[in-house]
Image (spheres, rainbow, N blue to C red):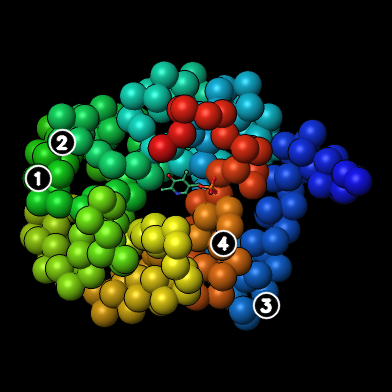
Amino acid sequence: MPDPIASSLDDDPLARWAEIRARVTRSARDSDRDPADVKLVAVSKTYGAEAIAPLIRAGQRIFGENRVQEAGGKWPALKVTAPDIELHLIGPLQSNKARDAIELFDVIETLDRAKIAEALAAEIQRAGKAPRLYVQVNTGAESQKAGVAPQEADAFITRCRALDLPVEGLMCIPPVDEQASPHFALLAVIAKRNGLGILSMGMSADFELAIQLGATHVRVGSAVFGARPQLAAG
Ligand SMILES: *Cc1c(COP(=O)(O)O)cnc(C)c1O
């Protein structure tokens, strides 16, 4: 038998969004944290403007996209609908897209190698404006995954700072087949010893756990927008 609550949430993205916000607030309180210190990044990749606009009207302001080109197709028009929208790049950045990324994004969460750091530093100089930056850490040391290796994180952060890059935090995507908590805990340790206050960790399946372990930003896509259209994901 269909669950009446689940199916009404399925039909109503705003109800889903409100529910996730309530869960974020509750998790923060349960961990004796101020709910205002935990931000919901609504991951809108693969969704069109018609799905995103109602959330903006309802008051959601922070959004995540994982492709520069896809974001460039829909966000310039959406951004003018609310001046304080904050757009995060959460997918890999190629150095030849650094210019477009700086133009479009307020935060780039996927700084993870010297080549990108140097390209961003050069483009920031040129543009005279800089997005805030998080370093992505490959906490599971997965060969196919982006991110700096945990044991190289400190040196990489130092290198980014030497380039005057505004590194504010860390981001991770734990391996899908492992418990997430050791990865979240590791990210928190690396952030602390580098004096970084922002932790972007936790997605639809595990954002409450991430909040318990110190997340300041949770990146939630499908639990807000519904299952993503196939093919376009990734
Ligand atoms: C797609 C994506 C998310 C959101 O995933 P959901 O499971 O849909 O919440 C979060 N972070 C990154 C880096 C992503 O690519």
Q: How crowded is mark 1: few (under 14 residues within 10 Å), some or many (20 or more)?
A: few
The Cα–Cα distance between marks 3 and 1, rounded to whole angstroms, is 41 Å
Left or right of residue 13: residue 101: left
Q: Is mark 2 on a helix, strand or loop?
A: helix
Type of the residue with mark 4: Phe
Type of the residue with mark 2: Ser
The Cα–Cα distance between marks 1 and 4, rounded to whole angstroms, is 31 Å
Residue 106 image offset from top left, x and y in percent:
37, 41
Quadrant into which the C terminus falls: top left
Nearest the viewer among 4 and 127 is 4
Q: Mark 3 points at which residue?
A: 30
Q: Is mark 4 on a helix, strand or loop?
A: helix
Residue 88 image offset from top left, x and y in percent:
41, 43
* Residues under numbered marks 3 and 1 in contact, where contact means CB atoms less than 8 Å apart: no
Indicate whether 225 appears above or below 193.
above
Between disc 3 and disc 4, whose residue precedes? 3
Q: Does the beta carbon of the residue at mark 4 sit less than 8 Å from ligand 1? A: yes
Q: Name the residue under label 1.
A: 115
Between disc 2 and disc 4, whose residue precedes? 2
Indicate whether 62 appears above or below 155.
above
Q: Mark 2 points at which residue?
A: 95
Q: Is residue 139 visible?
A: yes
Between disc 1 and disc 2, whose residue precedes? 2
